[in-house]
């Protein structure tokens, strides 16, 4: 793999670090609109496909049976900060399923932000599964298991009916086989299957448009898409790109990050799905890659342009808050991306 | 820059992420013993050269005038965790100079580990400059300013006499010009000058052996080297590679990490200095690169071999603590490095 350098970290006048990556932009027919780097290599999508993993929760009727709100469906697609609002919402989903945090098999995680960690510390608490960034997804999986009438214990194992349903939905959406020899265990203990970026991009083109999907599937996609757009704070939280962009773009885009520098998006007005990975796994670079794509591909109003500007060129600050440099897309990446415009 | 991939992140059977980098191993005459990637490109050494930046503190007589202990000299070379022991030691250095934490210009930083952050939170405190990972270096700089009889305010500026002394010492040790157009501001607000890795490697060959240095300089290097070896906990802290390796190797190696994936080392018994950088700035990869070099270059006893094994192949764990993969040196990197052995 020798993907091109797409993002650079600048300090003073010197390029301090470089991030390589690959990007696929695909329409809902599966046609690649634009790509850079190797988009055929298998990539673990990690949390970037939580919205696809949520499909069986909706399609099975579990979301209705449990009376899940938009916020709770959005939480099922979240890699959240573990703020009080996220942990509490996950607790409510579990309650609706007749379960508790003890049923979660994702493991504990400290909240992302110090101020949320401090709340736990001051209450003499330690983090539990509810604070795990994946707790909403796990609560939804547990709800699905209950509604399917299968045992909840072991719902994270690849052979469990819940994971089999998810695997089938992801295979249908991506058109890729989720094979055992490309299977890894995610940080939250569920299986993650590596497949080409172009397949994940195709899935998100369909997810955002409904094109080429059966009615039930298209309706489930729309419900999940709308839930995330209506309550983007539940998808991530304070200071996070997914929340900031979905709040600011009011339905124009769906974006979802994943660990190790993956990012997926849907742009319904263009009919595009996007999947990208930073080779080295850096979120700071996958964030800039995604913000750059949105800036180049979309016609922006002033608010949207301002919002993206800070995400395309985030400053590097000293600990006294002075700017020492920035992270930015490389000129070659910008030029190549602009050449893709009609 | 297209440096080779040296470290890979494995999940299941799939390579999930890749880290590229460059490495220079140089002897004290400046001869390159082995290198990989571009070692002529300018690289910001960041905190990896704190031991060189400490030279004027010792050579000026400031360390003696302030009656600095080994622990306090080691702290001057540290990127520490901001544990209580580190913050308190920095406070004592400032007291010895007749100063306080208010004189620090490095800015505040939360302690690295949640348990140390929790102590502050429970005491209703917020972090100050003493908790900044660079506080020991800054306290020493302030002590140097006092002993030099220059104003302490503004000691972080490139034009301040303290920074001029440091710049001259680093230029002499590296044989490279620290030029204004390759100058950036470090996270702790002092200047950092980009220069080739091979020059930093040369400096650390001399630092560890004293070869080719004037007597005063050689004595200062020895004092700083010994201080770090005698109190490696002050150089980093719990769970940190620099501390673990210097504790375990009892004087055989000096190692010091820096931000954005740089790492420098001295191996006196071989007469080698080492400088490396991970292209993308990832510490997880620069750690594996350095541990791999030590494993290949040194004859190890059982304890040393065991210690390095965990650092060369660190596991990737789920949040329930199960192994999901590992980080490891690539076969090509190992083979190339082994080919350098006599």
Image (tube, coloured by chain):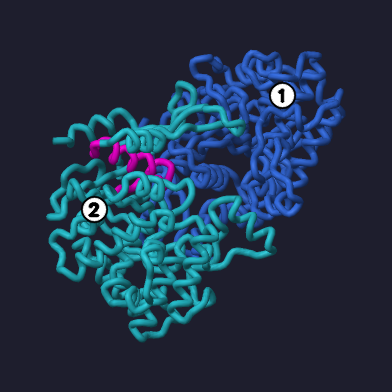
Chain colours: A cyan, B blue
The label shown at residue A201 is: 2
Residue A126, how many percent across, how many down?
A: 63, 64
Relative height, residue B235 to residue A151 (above, below)? above
Residue B266, how many percent across, how many down?
A: 63, 34
Q: Image point 79% across, 15% down: which residue?
A: B148
Q: Are marks 1 and 2 in contact (CB under 8 Å)?
A: no
Does the stretch in magenta take in A231? no
Image quarter where the N terminus of chain B lies is: top left
Q: Chain of mark 2?
A: A
Relative height, residue A214 to residue B147 (above, below)? below
Residue A279 shows in the view: no
Q: Image point 76% across, 46% down: which residue?
A: B84
Q: Chain of mark 1?
A: B
Q: Nearer the viewer, mark 1 or mark 2?
A: 2
Query: At numbered mark 1, what does the secondary structure look like: helix, strand or loop?
Result: helix
The label shown at residue A116 is: none
Q: Which residue is mark 1?
A: B55
Magenta residues span A275-299
Say few, some or many: other residues with alpha carbon within 10 Å of mark 2 (under 14 / 14 to 19 / 20 or more): many
Q: Quadrant of residue A120?
A: bottom right
């Amino acid at each position: 793999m020798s993907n091109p350098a797409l993002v650079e970290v600048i300090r003073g006048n010197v390029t301090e670090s470089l991030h390589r990556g690959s990007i696929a932009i695909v329409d809902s027919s599966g046609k690649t609109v634009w790509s850079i780097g190797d988009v055929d290599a298998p990539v673990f999508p990690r949390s970037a496909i939580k919205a696809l993993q949520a499909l069986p929760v909706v399609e099975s009727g579990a979301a209705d049976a449990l009376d899940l709100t938009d916020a709770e469906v959005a939480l099922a697609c979240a890699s959240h900060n573990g703020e009080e609002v996220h942990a509490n919402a996950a607790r409510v989903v579990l309650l609706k399923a007749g379960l508790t945090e003890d049923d979660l098999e994702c493991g504990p995680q400290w909240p992302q932000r110090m101020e949320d960690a401090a709340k736990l510390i001051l209450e003499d608490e330690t983090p539990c599964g509810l604070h795990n960034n994946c707790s909403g997804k796990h609560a939804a999986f547990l709800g699905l298991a209950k509604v399917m009438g299968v045992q909840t214990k072991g719902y994270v194992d690849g052979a469990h009916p819940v994971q089999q349903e998810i695997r089938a939905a992801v295979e249908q959406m991506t058109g890729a086989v989720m094979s055992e020899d490309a299977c890894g265990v995610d940080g939250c203990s569920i299986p993650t299957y590596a497949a080409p970026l172009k397949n994940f991009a195709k899935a998100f083109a369909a997810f955002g448009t409904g094109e080429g999907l059966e009615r039930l599937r298209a309706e489930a996609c729309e419900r999940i898409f709308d839930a995330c757009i209506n309550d983007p704070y539940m998808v991530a939280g304070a200071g996070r790109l997914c929340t900031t962009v979905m709040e600011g773009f009011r339905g124009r885009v769906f974006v979802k990050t994943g660990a190790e520098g993956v990012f997926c998006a849907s742009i319904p007005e263009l009919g595009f799905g996007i999947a990208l990975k930073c080779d080295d796994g850096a979120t700071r670079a996958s964030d800039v890659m995604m913000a750059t794509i949105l800036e180049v591909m979309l016609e922006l109003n002033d608010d949207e342009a301002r919002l993206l500007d800070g995400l395309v060129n985030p400053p590097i600050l000293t600990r006294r808050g002075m700017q020492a440099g920035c992270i930015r897309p490389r000129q070659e990446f910008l030029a190549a991306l602009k050449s893709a415009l009609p």
